[in-house]
Image: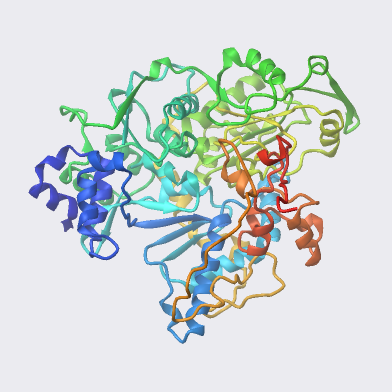
Amino acid sequence: MASTIACLLSMTPELIDCHNSIKILLESAIRNCDEFQVKSNDVEKIIDWENSAPKLVEIPFKHARILLQDFTGVPSVVDLACMRDAMNNLGGDFNKINPLVPVDLVIDHSVQVDVARSENAVQANMELEFQRNKERFAFLKWGSNAFQNMLVVPHGSGIVHQVNLEYLGRVVFNTDGLLYPDSVVGTDSHITMIDGLGVIGWGLSGKLRDGVTATDLVVTVTQKLRKHGVVGKFVEFYGEGRSELSLADRATIANMSPEYGATMGFFPMDHVTLQYLKLTGRSDETVSLIESYLRANMMFVDYSEPQIERVYSSCLALNLEDVEPCISGPKRPHDRVTLREMKVDWHACLDNRVGFKGFAIPKESQGKVAEFSFRGTPTQLRHGDVVIAAITSCTNTSNPSVMLGAALVAKKACELELEVKPWIKTSLALGSGFVTKYLEKSGLQKYLNQLGFHIVGYGCTTCIENSGDIDEAVASGITENDIVVAAVLSGNRNFEGRVHPLTRANYLAGTVVAQVINSSVLPDMFKVTYQAITDGNPMWNQLSVPSGNLYAWDSKSTYIHDPPYFKSMTMSLPRPHGVKDAYCLLNFGDSTTTDHISPTGSIHKDSPAARYLMEGGVDRRDFNSYGSHHGNDEVMARGTFVNIRIVNKLLGGEVGPKTIHIST
């Protein structure tokens, strides 16, 4: 078997000390160098990365595979389908339009928490998910049959990033005897989670104290890296503390790299990587091949050997023993607050002017009480009361120590006869069926159920504003009294308007107790979970799809629309046209996110997208979400910048999706 890097290292020994993240870029450039898309000078730029980086030079990168989820994956398949139409109209062979590298698409963004606090929640939510998205699912199923190199994992299987970590990730590819590193790009910012399996240097020392979780660590890392400034950078973790982190802990940190602004957070491969591969059911032959490849290419970290002193653009240091329990919020992932400072910080947020850390609630109104009846019981709400509590997101559900810690907290709460208020919407959404197995085998799921944290589905749910509706009486109490209520979730983003339109304060939190029960985590449990993951469920298997390799577009569909991008395409390129006399439409400040630009959550009844859907005969209750309509350019054009919390500076600070028609 051949290896690009091994050949290069034999000719250029000085590259042995190169960072692993740089080696992966270098290998791809050399393997794909054709003097057209990838040129020799691109290879030279990567080799000379220390001098190239300050100049912000551009380099091509050909990845090994692509990873998609259904919200952003559907428009990718729509593009492929309309490209085939264009090729056919121009008289070409449309069957040549296929992904050039393997594409894995996991359906995980569609499930909503309609049913909670119920033993039947999983099945009920899954049936509603299928009912709402049947047309989209049929389109994706057609795509998996029509296109080569495309794998679709049906709904109800798990969250894309956790499925990638536990099942899809290869670490090393073997293509016709040529070995090369696994690399992936995708249509979701948290694709970076796989970098835990996997240039600013981050030195880690010490180990986490008892009661401190990977969630506390990642909130701390996010705050420090945001402060340092790592946008567009590779963050590579090194130091003795790295070996103290499990792969699940590393994946949690890598997952949050979009929140701290880096292109990726990379953990070089070591014995922890190999142990995880074995744990998740990869064959001994596969793991042995991966280890041999990594060692031959000087990409394996062996802590029994002297460590190479590498050169980084800049270095940061963190002693893991200094990390303490914390949360982040109320509006941004990097606004870290220690638990001991939470009370003071909350009162400051009520006082502060409207901003990332402020709600501008007058002193005389901070003690306001909203009184209403909840299912016949007199109920009160105050500023800061929690109305949504969700254990969700691949960031945490992929980490057994965090999940078991949450379950142990639930067990202790039940033993002390503590209860969760009935008007709080509680949910437990998991990233894979493997989590269900170890929670049930450990006997801890029953305690989560007792507190109302029944499993509601396998998907992103609350983390992407699919929290579902809260009780009407609670919603009325909030809006009629202008109460600032909170959501607490174990997710990775808490931007305004993302979790729920009525929760103005949203905090990311883990547990304060973390213990690992490794004896219940067996490779066989992973194998059982994933052995038939692509076979689907009865609903998926009974779903009829169109035949043929050209898609039969439905002009009345509000989900899948034939876009105009290639309608006027000819064999000759048209001359480009400039833009003249254009006016400013929007003027935003910092921390403008994709949630502000193109929301994925609920469609407001008075929005342009809602009017378009109603004109097409869609009832309001069937609107679904913006994300579910990503395959329709007409809906998405009307959904751009409609975030209800967005602030356009052209309007002097007024909140909402508005602008000024400057020419008038």
The x, y position of residue 551, in whole percent, is 57, 76
At 61% from the left and 56% from the top, the residue drawn is 582
Question: On screen, 184 above or below 321?
Answer: below
* Side of 269 relative to 246 (left or right): left
In the picture, residue 209 is in which quadrant? top left
Please provide percent x and percent y for residue 205. Answer: 32, 20
38 to the left or right of 657: left
Q: Quadrant of residue 342?
A: top right
**At 46% across and 29% down in the image, what residue appears?**
226
Tell me residue 628's x, y (percent): 64, 57
Q: How many marks?
A: 0
**As rendered, which of 620 and 563 lies closer to the eye?**
563
Position of 64 compared to 584: left or right?
left
Q: Nearer the viewer, residue 591 or 197?
A: 591
Q: Is residue 607 toward the left or the right of residue 242 in the image? A: right
Residue found 56% across the figure and 62% down from its top: 75
Residue drawn at point x = 25 percent, y = 51 percent: 285
